């Protein structure tokens, strides 16, 4: 309920509609209703310079989990950006200007070795943000952030992020908990890399991506997956063929489609659930399409 | 107890606290011995105490399939064992095992949290330590992915030696196999190879680093990345 009221406050149209409905059904207090709507419209006309619609902000679960007062204060500091598959947000070692909160895009954090070899340390979708190092006292990233699935994100200037973090309270707590969740994801990926088969790793990767997507289709070449999993492309192709043979996915020319989610969950190692539990704890809501 | 005052300054985090904050935290700290093989907590345990090592080293070991293990970090006097408490995590996700005997100052997690909530320099130090831990963890991940057991063993030995400041590491092969997430036989073989090259000497649970500079040459680039990150952290907190 609270959330609905909150959204309504930020969407003058729906408020207007609500009061018009009231006026039509009850036929009274029309004048006071109009005055009320006008009063609402005054602050919301300021809202026109707000670069992002708040309903978009709420698509990022981390932002949506913020206390209302924090969100109200912060919402004007966000702006929307969209990304294509393969866009690089940051190279490792870059100075960061913005922290990114994906709303529909999925971003892969790749750790880059001196010889250019890469492996994914984490997947960040609408459950998180890019820029943990920033509020943890670093100015540069230690990993490459690359768009793994095209879509949108909202971003906030580094100075604003740091200032908010310093205020303490809700935003800080949430970001610290996110740092912990990311750490869990990295540790679990390390465990998975060491102990599980490429098939299982691909399953984990597919499920984590699927949870962060609105569709069943992942536009993704085996080459890119191989960079992320840090295994040879041939290894990815063989693993994908096996999953396709078991009718869990289809894999056609740069697109993988999840056709049997349950089956994938049966084939994945426990690493998926560990990471997932941690995000559930962080956000107090499910990201997984299954575990909820 | 009078030892404590000397001890606590050996821990980088405690040493970096301004005197006011230092005085605030001191009454909550008690000394404890870190004996080789002690388990400070296991996965899913409530982290009841946090430990500021002043000497020695604690390995964090993650579990998979309930038994296979792999090291995801080492914490010595530069840090804090149990720092996830600060990040809002009350339960352990890995086990913390003492792999280098020493001493630590420990305090109740609840007290620790209430001191963190007072703000000041402590939270900032913890942020920086977390950042260092994430960098190291990422490097361990990539090292595990791309490098052979021998390189990884060298990397771990160098890291352990840096933390302990001692050429002689008391460590069993079984412990190394957990840290590296490989079978014991593979560790024995890698140790044998390094021994043959006269880089280390291993005898009944005591591993001695004979030629540190040549050992560094054999290490993978991961070691220098971790070392640089650690140096940066130490400069930041100094």
Image (cartoon, coloured by chain):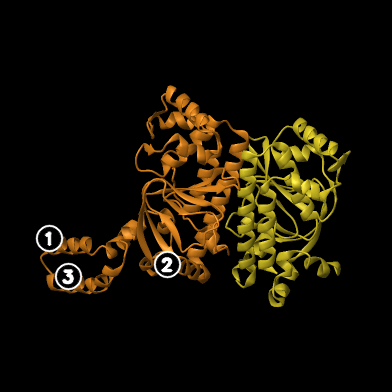
Chain colours: A orange, B yellow
- Give the SS element for disc 3: helix
According to the picture, the residue beneath numbered tag 2 turns out to be A70
| A20 versus B89 height, above or below | below
Q: Residue at x 69, y 77 (%)?
A: B20
Of residues B102 and A220, which is closer to you in this image?
Answer: A220
Of residues B57 and B52, which is closer to you in this image?
Answer: B57
Left or right of A210 in this view: B149: right
According to the picture, the residue beneath numbered tag 1 turns out to be A25
Among numbered discs 3 and 2, the one appearing first in the sequence = 3
Residue B22: tell me if it is visible. yes
Q: Could you say which quadrant of the image residue B195 lies in?
A: top right
| A14 versus A122 height, above or below | below
According to the picture, the residue beneath numbered tag 3 turns out to be A33
Tell us which disc is closer to us: 2 or 1. Answer: 2
Which chain is mark 2 on? A
Q: Residue at x 24, y 71 (%)?
A: A45
CA neighbours of label 2 inside 10 A, class few (<14), some (14 to 19), many (20+): some
CA neighbours of label 1 inside 10 A, class few (<14), some (14 to 19), many (20+): few
Residue A2: image location, x then y, percent: 34, 60
CA neighbours of label 3 inside 10 A, class few (<14), some (14 to 19), many (20+): some
Among numbered discs 1 and 3, the one appearing first in the sequence = 1
Quadrant including the N terminus of chain A: bottom left
Which residue reaches farthest right?
Answer: B203
Tell us which disc is closer to us: 1 or 3. Answer: 3
- Give the SS element for disc 2: helix
Among numbered discs 2 and 1, the one appearing first in the sequence = 1
Left or right of B101 in this view: A259: left
Residue A1: tell me if it is visible. no
Residue B83: image location, x then y, percent: 65, 57
Which chain is mark 3 on? A
Distance of label 2 from label 1 (alpha carbons)? 36 Å
């Amino acid at each position: 309920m609270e959330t609905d009221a909150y959204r309504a406050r930020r969407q003058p149209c729906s408020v207007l509609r609500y009061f018009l409905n009231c006026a039509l059904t009850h036929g009274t207090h029309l004048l006071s209703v109009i005055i009320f709507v006008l009063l609402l419209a005054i602050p919301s006309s300021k809202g026109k310079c707000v670069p992002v619609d708040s309903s978009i902000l709420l698509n990022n679960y981390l932002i949506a989990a913020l206390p209302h007062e924090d969100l109200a204060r912060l919402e004007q500091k966000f702006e929307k950006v969209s990304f294509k598959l393969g866009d690089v947000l940051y190279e490792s070692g870059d100075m960061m200007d913005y922290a990114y909160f994906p709303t529909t895009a999925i971003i892969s954090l790749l750790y880059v070795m001196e010889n250019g070899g890469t492996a994914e340390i984490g997947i960040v979708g609408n459950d998180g943000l890019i820029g943990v190092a920033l509020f943890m006292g670093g100015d540069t990233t230690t990993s490459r952030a690359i768009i793994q699935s095209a879509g949108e994100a909202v971003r906030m200037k580094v100075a604003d992020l740091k200032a908010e973090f310093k205020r303490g309270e809700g935003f800080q707590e949430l970001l610290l908990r996110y740092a912990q969740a990311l750490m869990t994801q990295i540790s679990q990926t390390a465990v998975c890399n060491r102990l599980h088969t490429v098939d299982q790793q691909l399953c984990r990767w597919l499920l984590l991506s699927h949870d962060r997507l609105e569709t069943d289709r992942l536009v993704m070449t085996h080459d890119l997956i191989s960079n992320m999993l840090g295994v040879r492309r041939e290894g990815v192709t063989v693993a994908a063929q096996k999953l396709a043979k078991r009718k869990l996915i289809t894999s056609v020319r740069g697109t993988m489609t999840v056709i049997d989610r349950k089956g994938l969950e049966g084939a994945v190692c426990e690493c998926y659930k560990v990471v997932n539990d941690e995000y559930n704890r962080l956000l107090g809501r499910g990201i997984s399409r299954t575990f909820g | 107890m009078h030892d404590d005052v000397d001890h606590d300054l050996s821990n980088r985090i405690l040493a970096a606290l301004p005197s006011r904050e230092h005085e605030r935290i001191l009454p909550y700290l008690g000394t404890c011995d870190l004996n080789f093989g002690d388990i400070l907590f296991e996965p899913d345990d409530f982290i009841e105490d946090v430990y500021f090592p002043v000497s020695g080293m604690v390995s964090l070991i993650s579990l998979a399939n309930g038994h296979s293990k792999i090291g995801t970090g080492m914490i010595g006097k530069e840090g804090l064992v149990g720092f996830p408490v600060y990040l809002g995590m009350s339960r352990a996700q890995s086990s913390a095992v003492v792999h280098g005997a020493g001493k630590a100052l420990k305090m109740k997690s609840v007290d620790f949290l209430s001191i963190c909530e007072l703000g000041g320099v402590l939270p900032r130090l913890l942020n920086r330590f977390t950042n260092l831990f994430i960098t190291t963890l990422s490097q361990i991940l990539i090292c595990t992915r791309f490098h052979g057991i021998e390189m990884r063993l060298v990397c771990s030995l160098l890291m352990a030696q840096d933390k302990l400041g001692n050429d002689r590491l008391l460590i069993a092969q079984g412990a190394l196999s957990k840290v590296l997430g490989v079978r014991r036989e593979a560790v024995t073989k890698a140790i044998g190879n390094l021994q043959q090259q006269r880089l280390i000497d291993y005898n009944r649970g005591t591993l001695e680093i004979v030629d540190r500079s040549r050992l560094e040459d054999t290490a993978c680039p991961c070691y220098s990345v971790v070392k640089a990150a650690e140096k940066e952290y130490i400069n930041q907190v100094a």
